[in-house]
Amino acid sequence: MATRRLYYDDAFEKEFTARVMHCEVLPPDVKSGITDRVWGLILDRTAFYPTSGGQPNDLGKIGDANVLDVRDEGDEILHLVDRKPSDAEVNCCIDWPRRFDHMQQHTGQHLLSAMFQERFGLPTVSFHLGDEICTIDLRGVEPSAEFLEGAERAANQVVFEDRPVNVRYGTADEFAELGVRKEVERKGILRAIEIEAADLQPCGGTHVKRTGQIGLVLVRRCAKVRQDWRVEFVCGRRAERVARHDFQLLRRTAGELSCAPEDVVSAASRALAERDANFKSVRGMQQRLAEAEAALALQSTPLATNGFRVVWRVFEGVPADYLGFFATEISKSEKALALVAAAEGGHVFFAQHPSAGKDMSSLLKQVLEKVGGKGGGTRDFARGKLAEQGHAQQALDAALSLL
């Protein structure tokens, strides 16, 4: 027996009564997040929308049971609940805030897709209604900022005009003659959603009755996804929350930059320029300091009996870049080798003058096998990071013994 879909004709029906036509125990469905035993119900009529067409399922109550999932099984709709209803005749209610949110997003998507196609020739090839953000994938040229703003503005103009949103039934051929946005190949009588003088599209989803109920359409951003362009958007209460959150972030950022919200971009640009200049200056000073310290280290390190000069040291309170500068300076001296590590961070650098004839990459690999960590490099210069920061001295001792 086919389930009568009440939401087809009245998406605003929040409560209804139905008869349980079939009930069976189903195993857990981990992929759907259902880890306990559930009951699968088929009702003679339902206002619960099943996951379909990019729109998630409804939630709510069937009798005293909680609805966990709703699935389209062809002619029938399967309701997954957490307990068996006590009676065959059940009172049901929809989780209305969730349903109305989905209606706002879905009708807003129809309207936004229509504006992208009508004004910019960009058809929608897929739609996803997420928990926080909705997306449509557009096919064609990259939507410019002007395209995104233009489609948003045109959609909101229709919202402000509060046009009727109607459910229509007909065949694919009949809808094609009426100028349907996207033709379908299904046979028989189809259901379509018509936004007056704006859009006509076959759809089985739930929608608002007038465009004013969409609330507001807010386009967020656009990114390339394979051959298409994914546009993020939100509608209604989501748009209100997102706009408020964005403003709070803007105000907080303005406070951190000690400027007015409208000056955030210019203030951030100045801060980034200052950061880059300071970074360049500090890096230059680090390199000059490393050169001086390396020269002193070479002077104070005697030649070994084999003619090599090995400088080894565990540094404290210095960044990894400084170790690299220091090791590089040491390796510029004939037959000199540098074995240095940082007490904090676990960074290790091995470097040599080519005349030393060792293999720093191989040496580092052997040391890391003993003390743990990862890294690599070339014959003359290698760097790594220890698995445990406190093993810096142990790593250098191992390197000295191997040399």
Image (cartoon, grey):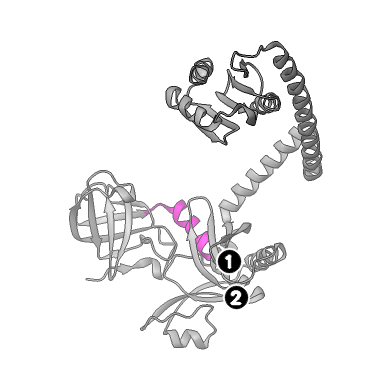
Using the image, determine if residue 110 lies above or below residue 93.
below
Element type at mark 1 = helix
Contact? badges 1 and 2 (CB < 8 Å): yes
Between disc 1 and disc 2, the foreground one is 2
Residue 5: quadrant of the picture: bottom left
Whether residue 90 sits left or right of residue 158 in the image: it is left
Q: Residue at x 65, y 17 (%)?
A: 317
Residue designated by label 1:
211
Q: Magenta stretch: give its range.
A: 94-107
Residue 170: quadrant of the picture: bottom left
C-alpha separation, residue under disc 1 versus residue under disc 2 = 11 Å
Q: Which mark is residue 198?
A: 2
What residue type is disc 2 on? Answer: Ala
Residue 139 image point, x, y percent: 57, 70
Question: Label 2 crowding class (10 Å Cα cut-off): few <14, some 14-19, many 20+?
Answer: some
Q: Residue at x 41, y 58 (%)?
A: 56
Whether residue 262 sits left or right of residue 127 in the image: it is right
Q: How many marks?
A: 2
